[in-house]
Each structure stands twice: as structure tokens, then as C-alpha cells.
Image (cartoon, rainbow, N blue to C red):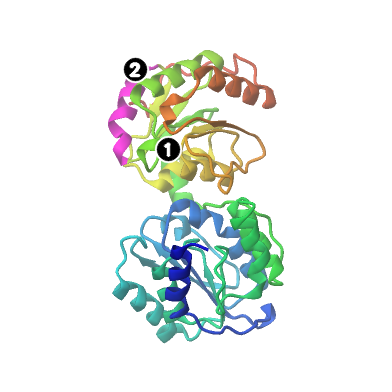
């Protein structure tokens, strides 16, 4: 037993308290705490859908400014939804964390259940749990705490020992606790407004490949040189237009790629995660080195080539058809022969001939 583990146990014990056993039929108010990344927000939907089927009265989601867009267009049936935004947890101060938890208790009363979806063993999480003091708590990070429901034992083992996909772990969690069984899947609800503006901008009803070349960190971002090579290979293997999916940092690269290649396009709209999701939703094939975009493709069941520089089994492709390539520490070490084989395999699984259709001569969303 490491010294770090012992010190963490001592520190966490100061914020622990004894929870009560709950019966799903008696649960009325639930808080999901997830001020973290986009993928963490998308993976929690098995919990949301199970609570919706349970017909709880109110669901409060504590989101970060980063993952709040995942919940902007979420609509539930009879369950009242409240989304509270706070700072990304790594940047949030203790005063803000306490204020959010205390505000929930003041405005809504004592929650029956808190779903601690941060999936981090840290003091900030424990402070939120203690200040909120729900009747019981669910989490999968395996902390031996009195405030955590015994129903977490099996899901925690799935997460900590077997590194199971995160949506599957949350789905099992709800089943173990006696809530309705739901499918383990990512979701990203999108309203008609963002879908309409993206479709109007693309103005192309045919098939296209959504190519994402950048991630949230440099390890998940292709260089311009590699992006050029990948597009050349894609155009050689499949005669389908390519739409570049990128964030604010990738505007210059996306413009250069769209100008260099025929039938390679980008949106002339300000980049946003919701607009990227709208592009992914209508794509025929997706290619990405970033797990957030991969999860969006999974949410819409888009056939995908997922390229990992640091593969984590908790975050796999979960669509019906996908190919996975794992490289070393640098995403630009991707083997182009391996990428070509993955592209051909995907094409074969989709029963796609080389000459799928004639590419359009012009395109209104061209760079």
C-alpha cells in the first residue's frame, strides 16, 4: 500500500459521511456532477436515460463551460431538467465548488442521489460531495467511502480492473442499483437550429467523409504534412468529398487544405463543438485522432476510423462499424499503409465501390 494511497484515504475520510440505502421508486431529486471534458458528458447518458425512465421529478446536471453544449438541446419527458454551469474542475476554486453544492441544497433541498461522474480521486470532488451531502452517492472510481452506495462495487471493478467502456460501466451501475436497464451508448443531442445552419452552409445532399485532424492536445493533432498525406490517400481510395472538422486553433490549416485539394471543404462558420457535431451527424464516414469527435461519431453511429496515439480501453469506438489504429506516442507516426488497409476494410464493410459517385464540380462551403 503506497504512502500516496494512505494519505489520500486520510484526507478523504475528513469529508466522508454515512449514506443511506435508497429505493429507486423513492428517488425524486438527482444531481449529476460532471464539470469535466466533453467525452465524460457524452458517456453519462445511460444514467440520464435510466433516470428518465424511472420518472424522477428533477435532474440537476452540474456541467463545465466546456461540456455544457452537450446538454443544451437535451429534452426529457416528465423529468424537470436543470443545468448548472461551473468552471472546469481543474480551474475551479474551492469557494466556487462549495457555493454550487450549497446553492443546490438551498434551492432544491437534499438530493436523494448524487452521481459523481468526474471519475477522479481528488479532494475537489470530495468537497463537492460533502457540501452537497446527498442521501447516497454513485461513483465508479473505486473509493472505499461510507457515502458511496454498495451498488457501486461491481461497476467500480469494471472500471478500475477491467477498464470497461465508460458508457457500459454507467449502464451497469444503474442496473445494479435497481434502476431501469438502458443501452450503453454515447449521446449528443442536437437541436434543429444548428443542424439547419450547418446543412445550409454545406448545401450538399450527397455523401461526404468528415475528417478531423486535431484534438484537444498536441498528441491528438495531425501535422499539416500528415493531413495532406491522409487526404491524398482518401481521395485515391474513395471518390467522395471531404469536409474538414476543426476547432478554432485549426482554422488556418483547414483553409489551406480546402484550397489545396478539389472537393475538400470546411464550414465558413465560426467553429463550435455543436457545429462539428452537426457535420458528424450527416457524415457517411468519419476519420479522427480525437476521442471527443470519436464519441460524437459513436453517438450518431457513423462508421469511423479511430486513430489513437495513447489507446485507452475505457474510450473505444462504440458504433456498429469502425476500424481502430493505435500508434506510438506521436500521432504523426501513423503508418500510412495501415491507414490504407483500414480505409479499404471500412469501404468493403460498407459495400462501397471505388467510384461511389461523381464529385460535384463546385461547392458553396469551399475554403
Q: Foreground: 331 or 157?
A: 157
Residue 366 appears at what percent x and percent y? 36, 26
* Secondary structure state at the residue bearing disc 2: helix
Bounds of the magenta span?
A: 248-261
Query: In the picture shown, does residue 136 fall above or below 262?
Result: below
Residue 94 in view (yes/no): yes
Q: CA distance from mark 2 to mark 1?
A: 23 Å
Residue ID for mark 2: 260
Q: Secondary structure at mark 1?
A: helix
Residue 200 numbered tag: 1
Label 2 or label 1, whichever comes before in sequence order: 1
Q: Is residue 367 left or right of residue 49?
A: left
Residue pictured at 52% horizontal, 52% vertical: 188
Task: Characterize the local packing of mark 1: few (<14), some (14-19) or many (20 or more) Cα atoms within 10 angstroms.
Answer: few
Q: Residue at horizontal 65%, vertical 74%?
A: 150
Left or right of 103? Residue 13 is right
Amino acid at each position: 500500500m503506497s504512502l500516496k494511497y494512505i494519505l489520500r484515504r486520510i484526507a478523504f475520510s475528513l469529508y466522508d459521511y454515512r449514506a443511506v440505502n435508497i429505493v429507486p421508486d423513492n428517488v425524486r431529486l438527482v444531481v449529476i456532477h460532471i464539470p469535466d471534458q466533453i467525452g465524460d458528458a457524452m458517456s453519462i447518458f445511460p444514467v440520464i436515460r435510466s433516470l428518465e425512465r424511472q420518472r424522477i421529478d428533477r435532474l440537476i446536471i452540474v456541467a463545465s463551460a466546456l461540456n455544457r453544449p452537450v446538454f443544451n438541446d437535451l429534452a426529457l419527458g416528465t423529468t424537470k431538467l436543470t443545468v448548472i454551469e461551473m468552471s472546469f474542475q481543474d480551474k475551479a476554486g474551492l469557494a466556487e465548488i462549495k457555493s454550487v453544492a450549497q446553492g443546490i441544497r438551498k434551492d432544491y433541498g437534499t438530493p436523494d442521489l448524487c452521481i459523481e461522474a468526474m471519475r477522479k480521486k481528488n479532494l475537489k470532488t470530495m468537497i463537492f460531495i460533502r457540501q452537497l451531502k446527498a442521501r447516497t452517492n454513485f461513483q465508479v472510481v473505486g473509493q472505499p467511502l461510507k457515502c458511496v452506495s454498495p451498488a457501486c462495487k461491481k461497476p467500480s471493478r469494471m472500471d478500475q480492473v477491467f477498464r470497461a467502456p465508460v458508457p457500459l460501466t454507467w449502464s451497469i451501475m444503474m442496473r445494479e442499483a435497481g434502476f431501469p436497464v438502458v443501452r450503453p451508448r454515447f449521446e449528443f443531442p442536437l437541436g434543429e437550429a444548428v443542424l439547419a445552419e450547418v446543412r445550409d452552409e454545406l448545401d450538399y445532399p450527397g455523401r461526404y467523409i468528415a475528417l478531423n485532424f486535431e484534438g484537444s492536445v498536441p498528441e491528438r493533432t495531425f501535422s499539416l504534412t500528415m493531413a495532406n498525406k491522409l487526404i491524398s490517400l482518401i481521395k485515391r481510395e474513395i471518390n467522395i468529398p471531404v469536409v474538414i472538422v476543426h476547432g478554432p486553433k485549426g482554422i488556418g490549416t483547414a483553409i489551406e487544405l480546402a484550397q489545396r485539394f478539389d472537393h475538400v471543404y470546411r464550414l465558413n462558420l465560426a467553429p463550435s463543438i455543436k457545429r462539428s457535431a452537426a457535420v458528424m451527424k450527416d457524415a457517411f464516414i468519419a476519420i479522427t485522432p480525437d476521442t471527443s469527435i470519436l464519441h460524437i461519431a459513436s453517438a450518431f453511429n457513423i462508421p469511423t476510423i479511430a486513430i489513437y496515439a495513447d489507446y485507452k480501453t475505457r474510450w473505444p469506438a462504440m458504433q456498429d462499424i469502425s476500424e481502430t489504429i493505435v500508434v506510438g506516442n506521436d500521432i504523426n507516426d501513423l503508418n500510412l499503409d495501415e491507414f490504407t488497409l483500414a480505409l479499404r476494410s471500412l469501404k468493403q464493410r460498407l459495400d462501397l465501390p471505388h467510384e461511389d459517385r461523381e464529385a460535384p464540380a463546385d461547392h458553396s462551403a469551399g475554403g
